Image: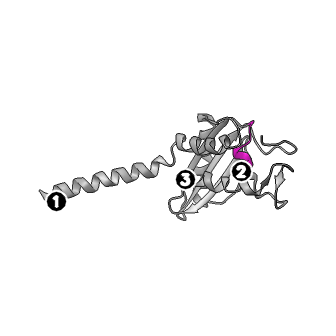
Amino acid sequence: MWFTKLSSAICFMALCLSHLSEAQNSPQDFVNAHNVIRAAVGVGPLVWNRTVASYAQKYADKRMKDCEMEHSYGPYGENLAEGYGNLDGVDAVKMWASEKPDYDHSSNSCASGGDDCLHYTQIVWSKSVHLGCGRAKCANGWVFVICSYDPVGNVEGERPY
């Protein structure tokens, strides 16, 4: 009897934990994580787009064999992230957003003169209104995350907002 209860409890906990890990990768989780950052600078919300998401997931699946941080050079703007273990979509968005201090709005450039703020500026690009993201566990144990944005952001000579 106690074994049955213990088995049931373990199964229930496993189900809860698997739901928790998936919850950070749902379309709504990706959208919410982006829109909090956009709202902080007065930019309107992104909307999940199934076509853009399908593109992103197909590209993530393509990267499964090597997990290379290589852009797709497709029709959308994109941010890429990789991490070992259980990198989830929300954590990837937080990594990109952490570049905010490197963006100098007055000069519309990255503070260092490089490109170390472009993930952040893509997130807050006001003309980008559609979002789709994908995630894949790679053969080497790493996790690859991509978010694609439509229309493309980071257009040279334009400001994100």
Q: Name the kind of residue labelled 1 in the image.
A: Phe
Name the one closer to the observer, 81 or 28: 28
Q: Which residue is mark 3?
A: 136
Neighbour tally class for label 3: few under 14, some 14-19, many 20 plus, Cα within 10 Å:
many
Q: Which residue is mark 1?
A: 3
**Mark 3 → mark 2, Cα distance in angstroms:** 22 Å
Place of residue 85 in the rendered image (x, y in percent of width and height, measured from the top left): 51, 63
State which region is magenta.
120-127
Instruction: Pick whichever of labels 3 and 2 is earlier in the sequence.
Output: 2
Q: Tag 2, which secondary structure?
A: helix
Q: Name the kind of residue labelled 2 in the image.
A: Tyr
Q: Name the kind of residue labelled 3 in the image.
A: Ala
Instruction: Pick whichever of labels 3 and 1 is earlier in the sequence.
Output: 1
> Is label 3 or label 1 in front?
1
* In magenta stretch: residue 124: yes
Q: Are marks 1 and 2 in contact (CB under 8 Å)?
A: no
Neighbour tally class for label 2: few under 14, some 14-19, many 20 plus, Cα within 10 Å:
many
Q: Which residue is mark 2?
A: 120
Q: Does residue 73 lie above or below 70 as drawn? A: above
Residue lying at 53% horizontally and 40% vertically, measured from the top left: 28
